[in-house]
Image (spheres, grey):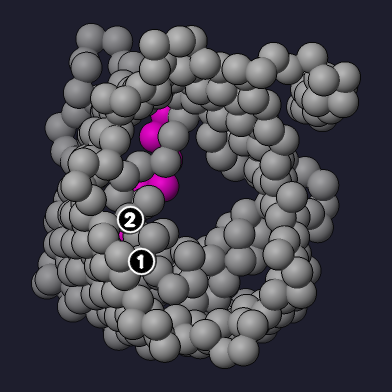
């Protein structure tokens, strides 16, 4: 896996240095390197202290490209590899471009892209979560979502009067059954000034096409200037007897050059097990420059009998019901 990644990186660097990119074509190399110390408590095997990659944001190396085809039409692509800063290994189970891998066309009427992509549901959750679905305060510790879709065709509208929309279809690719393993996602949103409102839905079929998970999220964010408040309400049904509601209330408060983050998240189980859980989270990010910041975060989950949720971060599920993070993130 390391040889293809090295070859791609070398070729891209030479491509940029020699200046062979035509005026109507762009190629961008970008990434994030994130590492922090994580302390977890409340796990079945005891407390754990470790150095972890991707605490606030998953570490990644990405390539973006665009070619102007004329007439308002352009070709686009993104290839994004996740990696672990602490060990140098690939993330996402060893996939070369496990974070994103897609190619598509863009025009004034919208974009169409095909490949491995983020779901509309996850993109909304990431947008309204004060912690950006990272750090110990990660809302996905309790809130249900499907992060990515394979074999996906996605349509995205341009912004019309503040409104935007997405529609995504992920082929299940099971012979004899087009329903099995299929995913369908959609979102509709409105943004104007300090206000963001959006609703998103995700449907994931099981491997036999006989059952499915359905997640609907309504989210909003309003920036008051002195602070930005976020609210999310999720409805989750299936697979099996799954029936629960998610609630998230968050706030981001500028403090000097940095930002104070806080949120309360609740899982309300309505399946009859009554396996509810609450999460309280507090964090702070401090910029050292435009590209580099320090971070720290603490979160605690209170599980009802029958619930076993853990405090994780951007890349790990966590091992206990309490966690503390401190680390550094650099973007390039």
Q: Residue 105 placed where, x, y %?
A: 41, 18
Q: Is residue 215 visible?
A: no
Q: Magenta stretch: residue 46 in it?
A: no
Crowding at mark 1 (Cα within 10 Å: few <14, some 14-19, many 20+): many
**From the viewer's perspective, is residue 202 above or below residue 227?**
above
Q: Residue 75 placed where, x, y %?
A: 49, 17
Q: Which residue is at 49% across, 76% downward? A: 137
- The region drawn magenta spans 144-151
Q: Which residue is at 26% across, 67% downward? A: 195
Crowding at mark 2 (Cα within 10 Å: few <14, some 14-19, many 20+): many
Answer left or right for 152 relative to 318: left
Determine which quarter of the picture holds residue 316.
Answer: bottom right
Q: Residue 243 placed where, x, y %?
A: 15, 62
Q: CA distance from mark 1 to mark 2?
A: 6 Å
Q: Nearer the viewer, residue 234 or 123?
A: 123
Q: Are marks 1 and 2 in contact (CB under 8 Å)?
A: yes
Q: Residue 117 placed where, x, y %?
A: 44, 34
Instruction: Name the residue carrying label 2.
Output: 124
**From the viewer's perspective, is residue 193 above or below residue 201?**
below
SS of the residue under disc 1: helix
Q: Nearer the viewer, residue 54 or 13?
A: 13
Q: Is residue 138 visible?
A: yes
Answer left or right for 244 relative to 77: left
Instruction: Name the residue carrying label 1.
Output: 128
The quadrant of the picture occupied by the N terminus is top right
Determine which quarter of the picture holds residue 62.
Answer: top right
Q: Magenta stretch: residue 149 in it?
A: yes
């Amino acid at each position: 896996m390391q040889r293809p990644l090295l070859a791609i990186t070398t070729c891209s660097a030479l491509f940029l240095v020699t200046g062979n990119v035509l005026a109507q074509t762009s190629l961008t190399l970008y990434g994030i390197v994130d590492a922090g110390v994580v302390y977890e408590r409340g796990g079945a095997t005891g407390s754990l202290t470790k150095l972890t990659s991707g605490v606030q944001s998953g570490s990644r190396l990405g390539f973006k490209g665009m070619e102007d085809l004329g007439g308002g039409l352009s070709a686009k692509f993104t290839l994004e590899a996740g990696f672990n800063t602490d060990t140098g290994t690939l993330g996402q189970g060893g996939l070369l471009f496990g974070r994103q891998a897609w190619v598509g066309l863009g025009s004034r009427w919208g974009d169409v892209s095909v490949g491995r992509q983020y779901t509309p549901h996850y993109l909304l959750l990431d947008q309204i979560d004060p912690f950006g679905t990272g750090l110990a305060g990660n809302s996905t510790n309790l809130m249900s979502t499907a992060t990515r879709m394979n074999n996906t065709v996605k349509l995205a509208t341009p912004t019309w009067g503040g409104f935007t929309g997405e529609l995504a279809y992920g082929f299940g690719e099971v012979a004899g059954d087009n329903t099995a393993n299929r995913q369908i996602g959609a979102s509709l949103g409105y943004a104007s000034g300090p206000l963001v409102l959006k609703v998103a839905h995700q449907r994931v079929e099981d491997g036999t096409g006989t059952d499915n998970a359905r997640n609907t999220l309504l989210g909003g964010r309003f920036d008051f200037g002195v602070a930005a408040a976020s609210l999310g309400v999720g409805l989750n049904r299936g697979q099996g007897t799954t029936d629960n509601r998610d609630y998230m209330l968050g706030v981001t408060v500028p403090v000097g050059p940095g930002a104070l983050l806080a949120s309360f998240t609740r899982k309300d189980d309505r399946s009859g097990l009554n396996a509810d859980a609450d999460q309280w989270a507090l964090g702070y990010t401090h910029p050292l420059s435009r590209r580099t910041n320090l971070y720290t975060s603490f979160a605690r989950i209170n599980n009802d009998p029958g619930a076993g949720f853990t405090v994780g971060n951007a890349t790990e599920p966590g091992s206990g019901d309490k966690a503390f993070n401190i680390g550094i993130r650099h973007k390039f």
